[in-house]
Structures are given as C-alpha cells and as structure tokens.
Amino acid sequence: MQHAIGAALQPAQRDVIQHSHERSATFGLFETMRPDYAVLSGAELAVRLDQSRALFAHALPVMETLYAQIANTHSMIALTDASGLILHSLGDDDFLARAEKVALRAGAVWSEEHQGTNAIGTTIAERIAVTVHGDQHFLRANQFLTCSSVPILDPHGNLSGVLDVTGDRRGYHQHTMALVKMSGQMIENRLIASAFSEKLCIRFHSRPEFIGTLMEGIAVFDLDGRLLCANRSAQFQLGLELGRLRAQTLETLFGESADALIARAGETPGRLELHSGVSVFASVEFHARPTPGGPARSPALSLPGSAASGLAELCTGDARVQEIVGRVRKVVGKNIPVLIGGKPVRARKCLPARSIAIRPAARGRSSR
C-alpha cells in the first residue's frame, strides 16, 4: 500500500520521510507486516554495551535528567548505538509496557532495515534530527508512536549513536525535539571533554554569559595548533563544518599560538578574534598528559611559554620565591624563552627558594 505523507510537513521534512519510505520498500518491508521483534540475549547485549561504554557512561546521567523533564507524559527515552541497537531505555511504566509489545527496549534493533521508517532508523540513515509522527511510520504496528531522535557524534565526527524520545502519538509535544537536541549536545560535549589526554581546549562565545552553557563553542587543539575536534556550536560560530575546520590551525582560526593561549589557561575569559573578524570571549583550558608514575605535569614546567598557567604551583610562601615568580610573570607571553633549573629535592611538594634559579635561556634551545 502506498503511504500518504502528511501535507502539513515542511518540504524538507516531507522529503526525508518520503525517501525513508522508499528505502523501507527496497528492504522488502510492507505496511502490514509483523515488525522484527528479535532481541539480543543478556550476554550479547553486555558485549555491545562494552563496545559503546564511553557513549553509555556519558549518556546515562543526561538521560536521567531528560527523563525528569518529561516524566508522566506517557513516553520513554532510548539510547542506541550506531547500528540502531537499543542499549538502554527508561520511561513511564505504563508506556514501557506498550513499548515492550513492539520490542522498543534494550537489545532490539530499530534500523530502517528492521523497522522501516522510524525516528531512530531514519536519523541513522540521514544523520540529522528526525521526528516521525503517527502514520508517518512505515509499519502500521508502529503508527501509535511519535518518535524524536538526534544523532550523537563522537569527537571525530563519526556517528556514535542516537538519542530518542518516543511516546504515544496522542501526547505529542512540539517542544520534545528541542529537549532531545539539547540533551544530545550535552552528551557530545561530555564525550569531547573526556576524549583527549593532552589538549588545549577553547570555550568561546560572543557573549560571555554563554561560556559554560550549551551555547558555547568548544574547539580542541593539539600542542602544535592542529584542530582535533569542534562541537556543533563551534562549527556554527566559525562558519565551517568539521571536515573543513580540520584543514585550519589555531592561528588561522583564532590568531594566537598554542604557547600564547596556554599562558592564559585558567584565567578569566578574555577576548579573541575569529578568522572572520568577529570578536568573542574565550576561556582557555590546558590539560597535560600525566607523567608515568607521577601526577600530571604542570603546564608551566612542560611547555615553553606556558608559565602563567602553572606559576601558582610554586607555592612555598617564601618571599624570595614570590620575587622570582613575579619576574617570570613579566616575560610570560613575550616570546622570551625561560629556563627553570634547580637541584632535585626529595619528598617535597614545593621547591625550596634556594634551589630555584631562573635566567633567560639561550635562543634556539629547548626550555622544556
């Protein structure tokens, strides 16, 4: 039977649903067929969960927060991997009982190949946020549902999974998609924050009050100034998609070197100018790779030009050390190499004043 696509849909939405219906037909599905209700065993699901452990770990608290916002709306939240396998779900008991009847639970696969047009499967196929309402579902058995899904991308721009809210079609709320999009972005930002052991992270926005919120752009660079990843807000503010951003450098995007920005790490957000000429407020974070057998290196001691972000570590309280620290602060960010030398001291958290000597380093010599 030929499906009628709702005339109320915007042209782009109508095209997405229409193309999904066409794909569903090519998979050999038909409207009145019984959906695929196969569910993985507990052992098989455990293996798949382990394969997606980072996604699951960062998505779970976000899902719980999202559920608190939609509780008692006869709906549920589902997290899937990139294949459409549901890894975890939670929701209202009354609706979960109905969802169980169409295998909308952990261990079931909701790709288009298995279930025809549905928000999870169509999001995977199109890699965009999708709402599928009522009879827009290809299979009649699923037409009592309304589903809103967003793709979750890993820090490298690859599809990691899908976050979905599904409910009774009679309880459809237009604001649901906005909540799902916000939650998906929270998960992506959490994945970015945990992905790199040594990184220079810039959080930025044209309005300072948006730094630290979902509106902020997040761009992560290696210590040579190469872009590692950028969240959706950063891509929007920089005016480039992730693939094109990877061809850029820290200096071409923000007009600053890695050393200069590392020196600003931990400071109050200051201004930077984007390559487009737009001025933004930016907060800089620098996380050094842990030294084997010891704590993370202080940025001040690991890289030239990074002293400002770690000078507070020289916390002896000694007046002579304070004087030396003050002298170092005066040359930070001025491209003047500084050599910090001293005798090794055992079982001391801070260096004693008499063991520290700071002098300009010879040009062309590494000061690491």
Image (tube, rainbow, N blue to C red):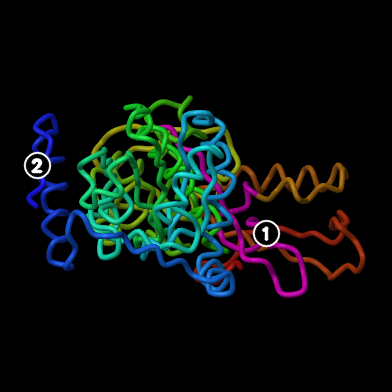
Query: Residue at left 41%, top 41%?
Result: 165
Real-space Cα separation, disc 2 to disc 1, in angstroms: 78 Å
Quarter the C terminus occupies: bottom right
How many badges with numbers are in the image?
Answer: 2
Q: Residue flagged by tag 1: what amino acid is it? A: Arg
Residue ID for mark 1: 359
Q: Residue at x 49, y 31 (%)?
A: 70
Q: Is residue 109 left or right of residue 368?
A: left
Specify start and end residues of the magenta stretch as a single range. 281-309
The residue nearer to you, when weighing 7 against 38, is: 38
Q: Quadrant of residue 217?
A: top left
Residue shown at the point (17%, 59%) measured from the top left:
30
Q: Is residue 356 positioned above or below 282 on the image?
A: below
Instruction: Residue 182 in the image: state x and y as whole percent.
Output: 42, 37
Q: List the residue tagged with mark 2.
A: 4
For label 2, the SS is loop
**Mark identifier at residue 60:** none
